Amino acid sequence: MTKAVRVHQVGGPEVLTYEDVEVGAPGTGEVRIRQHAVGLNFIDVYFRTGLYKAPGLPFIAGNEAAGEVLAVGPGVTNFHPGDRVAYYYNLGGYASERVIPADKLVKLPDHITYEQGAVLMLKGLTVWYLLHKTFKVEHGHRVLIHAAAGGIGLLACQWARALGAHVIGTVGSKAKADLALANGCDHVILYNEENFVERVKQISRGELCDVVYDGVGKTTFPGSLSCLRPRGLFVSFGNASGPVPPFPLAELNNHGSLFATRPKLNDYVGTRKELLEGADTLFAAVINGKLHVPINHAYALKDAAKAHIDLESRATTGAAILRP
Ligand SMILES: NC(=O)c1ccc[n+]([C@@H]2O[C@H](COP(=O)([O-])OP(=O)(O)OC[C@H]3O[C@@H](n4cnc5c(N)ncnc54)[C@H](OP(=O)(O)O)[C@@H]3O)[C@@H](O)[C@H]2O)c1
């Protein structure tokens, strides 16, 4: 018997239930792992509330973690007991042990800790594809990153800066502004107090941004469109404040022949080749010192509800982990 945090009915943080679960032996192509650190993500909130639909109830929450291989099933040749591994995978993450398909795992390099691995596979890989694949950020681009002091935000600001971009971030407090400035932002806007569209116009001297990365959603729309130069790209990748409402395509025309996309990680690391390309690039960026991984909060797995309360009330910065 091992421990996991399950959701029996969707709802508030109180539906996260810490309980005993049976974990079977790994089947063909599967691996059983003992988890040392689990990443906390806003997507965990969407599944818990029902905004994103889990395949059924009850389900074990959580989408990224790191740990060591305990046993491998028939047909698994590339992983062995004792290997240090990490993954991004739909649900099942909030657990002390689990079984998972081997092709979802990557090996952790010696210099990457379990804690780093646990927050890099969802957050880090997302930042990798957003900055390298959705839009290829290059020297001289001006980028706007909303929620710049968040888990995705601090990694994105650092990496965009390292790629040579001019980085404008939005944040909810002065303390978060200081953190974002220390993690790659050239300018920070307090979007609860200032009109972020007007500030982006001022900062860019009217030239606006090449790309806007928007994981906030409802409250930053349609302002984000007004921050883009003609033919710029609106990347709507999340809904921390609620989903972006449906809007007429003509809005893209009105704002200057804009492009818009609503990407998700699954579609960028769907093949083994893509997953390894992303993980290799990401781990190299951390090992080379290009990317610092800010893990600013740690909770016991049994306190997952408290972690969700903090995340939803905007009390966290950077990444947070749960310890099984
Ligand atoms: N599409 C993908 O592939 C993908 C993958 C991973 C994550 N995501 C998305 O990326 C976004 C960031 O995820 P994360 O896990 O790193 O979370 P996070 O940024 O650490 O936390 C969310 C942040 O959003 C801001 N926010 C603005 N309005 C909010 C509201 N009404 N309620 C709560 N927070 C609000 C807060 O920062 P301020 O206080 O500074 O405003 C808060 O700290 C989420 O939307 C997530 O769904 C998308």
Image: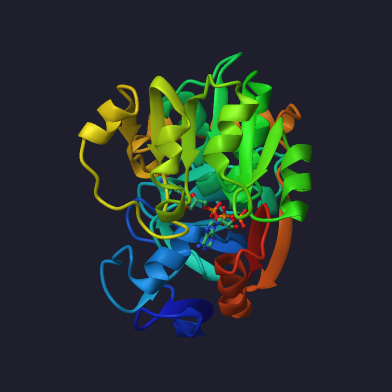
Residue 128 placement (x, y as % from top left): 52, 33
Q: Residue 143 falls in which quadrant of the image?
A: top right
Q: What's the coloring here?
A: rainbow
Asked if one can make out residue 26 in the rendered structure from this viewpoint, the answer is: yes
Residue 196 placement (x, y as % from top left): 56, 42
Q: Nearer the viewer, residue 270 or 32?
A: 270
Q: Residue 69 falls in which quadrant of the image?
A: bottom right
Residue displayed at 37% across by 43% down: 264
Q: Nearer the viewer, residue 8 or 211?
A: 211
Residue displayed at 21% across by 33% down: 250
Split into 4 quadrants, where in the image is the C terminus?
bottom right
Q: Residue 273 falls in which quadrant of the image?
A: top left
Residue 180 placement (x, y as % from top left): 71, 42
Labels in figure, total: 0
Q: Nearer the viewer, residue 311 or 221?
A: 221
Asked if one can make out residue 283 in the rendered structure from this viewpoint, the answer is: no
State left or right for residue 202 relative to residue 27.
Answer: right
Looking at the image, which residue sits at the far top?
A: 139
Residue displayed at 34% across by 35% down: 271
State left or right for residue 239 relative to residue 107.
Answer: left
Q: Nearer the viewer, residue 95 or 40?
A: 40
Residue displayed at 68% across by 23% down: 162
Residue 58 placement (x, y as % from top left): 33, 79
Q: Height in image: 314 above or below 292?
A: below
